[in-house]
Amino acid sequence: MSKVLRITGYILLFFIIIFIIFGIWLNFYFNNKLIENIKERVTESTNNEYALSLDELTINLFTHTITVNNLIIAPSKKKEAHSKAEYVFKAKILRIIDFSIMSYLRGHDLSIGKVEFEEPQISIFQGFERLPKKMMNPSSTIFSIYTTFSKKLNSISVGQIDIMNSKFNIYKNGTDTLSVFSTNDNSISIKNF
């Protein structure tokens, strides 16, 4: 009996070691490829108008969490004056908690328990045109998170979204440092999104 128990223990230890090695590989090798892929998708889906940058992306398979530090989505080209409004989104920490890998592998359904944004900041820089003009080119599309990920996903469900200590600023143009409208330290929680 002790020989069977010992063999079972070795097999279990082997699978635990493989799982740990896979987690380490995921954080070192796969993270870089994932970051570059996400950056390319954001740039392509915004027609090279916006770029994504982040300091660190960590995927923890044990706790089913993804953490992104210093996430920034901003215009890719710095212009002094622009005709249409531009947006900058920053978040100190974006945390995706309790995501389900199996539901994605089975049916391309993404199930997330909780999404947390710590200290997000949205800045809008108004352009010269106060009302957007009608699109002249029907092939140019507006950026949409849905169209970016809809090719790979059937559905997304999020149990809770927490936005903590957010800031919202509106500036007259890209060179202004004094905002026209500003609000700080806003928090909101949304359930069953």
Image (tube, rainbow, N blue to C red):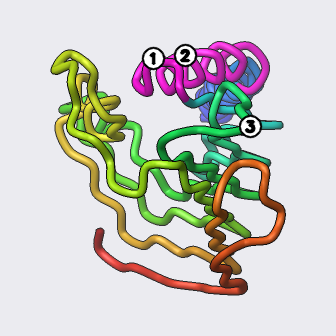
Q: Amino acid at mark 3?
A: Glu
**Is residue 44 one of those drawn in magenta?**
yes
Residue 11 relative to residue 113: left or right: right
Q: Residue at x 67, y 34 (%)?
A: 2
Dot placed on the residue nearer the N-terminal end, 1 or 3: 1
Q: Which residue is mark 3?
A: 80
Q: Which residue is mark 1?
A: 44
Q: Which residue is mark 2?
A: 40
Q: Residue furthest front?
A: 128
Numbered label tally: 3
For mark 2, give the secondary structure: helix
In front of the other: 13 or 43: 43
Rendered position, 118 above or below 187: above
Quadrant the N terminus occupies: top right
- Relative image position of residue 135 (x, y in whole percent): 22, 31
Query: Are the residues tagged 1 and 3 within 8 Å (C-beta)?
Result: no
Which residues are the magenta region?
A: 27-49
Q: Amino acid at mark 2?
A: Glu
The label nearer to you, 2 versus 3, is 3
Asked where in the image residue 187 lies, by quadrant, the reply is bottom right
**Is residue 65 one of those drawn in magenta?**
no
Q: Distance from label 1 to label 2 (Cα)?
A: 6 Å
In front of the other: 70 or 159: 70
For mark 1, give the secondary structure: helix
Q: Amino acid at mark 1?
A: Glu
In front of the other: 51 or 56: 51
